[in-house]
Image: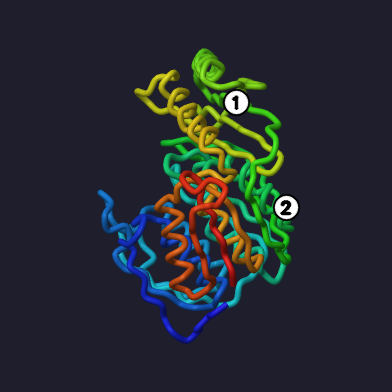
Amino acid sequence: MNTKKDSELLLDGSQGEGGGQILRSALALSMLSGRPFRLTKIRAGRSKPGLMRQHLACVRAAALVGNAQVEGAEIGSTEIGFRPGTIRGGQFEFKVGSAGSTMLVLQTVLPALLRADAPSRISIEGGTHNMLAPTSDFIADAFLPLLARMGAQVQMTVERHGFFPAGGGLVHVEVRPGPLQPLHLHERGASTGLEAIALLRSLPQHIGERELEIAARRLPLTASARRDLSAGFGPGNALVLKASYANVTEIVVGLGEHGLSAESVAENACRELRSYLAHGAPVGEHLSDQLLLPLLLAGGGSFVTGRPSSHLETNVAVIHAFGAAQVSIAPDQGNPQQHFRVSLET
């Protein structure tokens, strides 16, 4: 890995996806490489530019894990400087505040913790089910099993679910550092089931039943269930769709919100999953950008996905900017019209 530890890398936060992805990837890569960076124009194109609460939580978490010196770590800041030290394991507690995503904080620090000098146990309080962020279901059932196949030892427990706007979710994650093996994921393998689970807290049961009814109409389900969550912070609802295969699992989550009918929640989630089922590639849109840093830790790997998302392309650009690896995205020979092979080499 080309670290260039003495030179500060300048990154433009308005490029590519233009949101928090650049920040999170840069924090992770900086900790792994030891190279400091300065990020300007943070979320410049958003209606509220600069660091929001969940982005600030990611910066503060990375600063603790990476023993880093940080400039500009405050709400609304459009520029930060981050100078990492030595990654350390141990016990950490991170509070995002409100319903900010716990999973985005985990996504930021997990690569470094897999390279730490000791095992870690982290507790993160905030949202577990957020718009525009991976949910705890996705991380638990789609992402972490692939890390386990690569050799990672990561265990996650959801003590409380946290929904917008109250938040209050609480997750615990145990990480044992160690080497990872490359992953080559080119085919889904045989189907092993298609499930729908309706999560409800402090809401009428008929909401979940209506969502499951729509899912049963739109998808060839092999199982469905309603899960009533224990008391927590405010009401919440999510429809979790789980498509399992021999080599990969795809998770799609529809989130209930005020003013959106149960039928609309289910229809939207089913439409997204049906798109995944139709294109046939093993790696879905949201999993594709999240696999790059584990492949980097493993020293290489490849996977086949559908049309590249802006998040995937942004992650590739940040990896190249750090000189951490070479990543190529090219039409896959098996289905060049719909499938793309992503390969990473260090």
Please, which residue is most extreme toward the bottom here?
A: 6
Give me the residue at 59% from left, 69% from top.
Answer: 345
User: Residue 326 in the image: x percent, y percent?
Assistant: 52, 70
User: Is disc 1 surrounded by few (<14), some (14 to 19) or many (20+) residues within 10 Å?
Assistant: many
Say what secondary structure mark 2 lies in. Answer: helix
| In the foreground, 92 or 308 | 308
Q: Which residue is mark 1?
A: 197
Q: Which residue is mark 2?
A: 149
The residue drawn where x is 36% and y is 53% is: 52
Give the amino acid at mark 2.
Arg
Query: Split into 4 quadrants, where in the image is the N terminus?
Result: bottom right
- Name the mark on residue 322: none
User: Closer to the N terminus: mark 2 or mark 1?
Assistant: 2
Viewer-side label of 2, 1? 2
Find residue 165 and report its image quarter: top left
As helix, strand or loop, the secondary structure at mark 1 comes to strand
Say if residue 38 shows up in the picture.
yes
**Where residue 202 appears, x then y in whole percent?**
52, 22
